[in-house]
Image (cartoon, grey):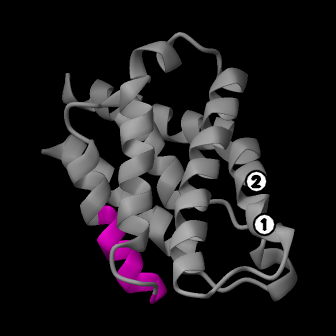
């Protein structure tokens, strides 16, 4: 039960970070917080957090950001599937190599959103659209360490 609350709390924080106002010049560098938290939990608890959770979290993110209903949900499902498919191999990598995997997963996420927006005629005007892939990969080690530390503290508190 407490582990579920920790997962929900981490997604709530990620969604808050996803919608917090930022200056226009800095908005392009906003990491994909929700996708990174999803990647972490799919890696650590694949039996608890998987495609179904990704779909629900994506629908909530769609409602929060005012995007087309299902766009973020579909993109997060693609990311969750990608990460769960290679979950055992990703566990063998060190933190820097995991950051490269996060870059690829966030690129997949951005690509799906790009395709959906393209079908709707809302193409981004600049290549800066792809910068969240880089900023997410750079921030990933800290996200991983913070969430891992939180999970470890929880495990110690339960015993």
Q: Quadrant of residue 25?
A: bottom right
Asked whether disc 1 touches disc 2, contact meaning CB atoms under 8 Å apart, the reply is: yes
Left or right of 9 on screen, residue 72: right
96 in the magenta segment: no
Q: Give coordinates of residue 100: x percent, y percent.
A: 70, 31
Q: Give coordinates of residue 68: x percent, y percent.
A: 41, 84
Q: Nearer the viewer, residue 97 or 114?
A: 114
What residue lies at 71% left-to-right and 46% top-to-bottom? 139
Is residue 27 visible to the viewer in this orientation of the structure?
yes
Element carrying mark 2: helix
Q: Main secondary structure of the magenta part?
A: helix
- The stretch of residues the image draws in magenta is 57-66
Q: Quadrant of residue 72?
A: bottom left
The N terminus appears in which quarter of the rendering?
Answer: top left
The span from disc 1 to disc 2 (Cα, nearest Å) is 6 Å
- The image's mark for residue 135 is 2
Q: Nearer the viewer, residue 55 or 29?
A: 55
Residue tagged 1: 29
- In primary-sequence order, the first of circles 1 and 2 is 1
Left or right of 27 on screen, residue 140: left
The C terminus appears in which quarter of the rendering?
Answer: top left
What residue lies at 60% left-to-right and 88% top-to-bottom? 121
Q: Give coordinates of residue 11: x percent, y percent.
A: 38, 59
């Amino acid at each position: 039960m407490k582990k579920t609350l920790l997962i929900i709390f981490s997604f709530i924080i990620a969604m808050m970070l996803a919608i917090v106002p930022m200056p226009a010049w800095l908005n392009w560098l906003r990491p994909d917080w929700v996708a990174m938290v999803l990647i972490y939990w799919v890696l650590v608890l694949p039996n608890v957090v998987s495609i179904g959770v990704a779909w629900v979290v994506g629908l909530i993110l769609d409602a929060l950001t005012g995007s087309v209903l299902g766009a973020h949900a579909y993109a997060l499902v693609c990311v969750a599937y990608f990460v769960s498919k290679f979950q055992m191999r990703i566990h063998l990598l060190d933190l820097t190599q995991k950051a490269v995997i996060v870059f690829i997963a966030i690129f997949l996420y951005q690509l799906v959103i790009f395709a959906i927006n393209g079908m709707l005629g809302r193409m981004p005007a600049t290549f800066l659209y792809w910068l969240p892939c880089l900023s997410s990969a750079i921030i990933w080690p800290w996200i991983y360490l913070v969430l891992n530390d939180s999970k470890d503290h929880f495990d110690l508190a339960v015993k």
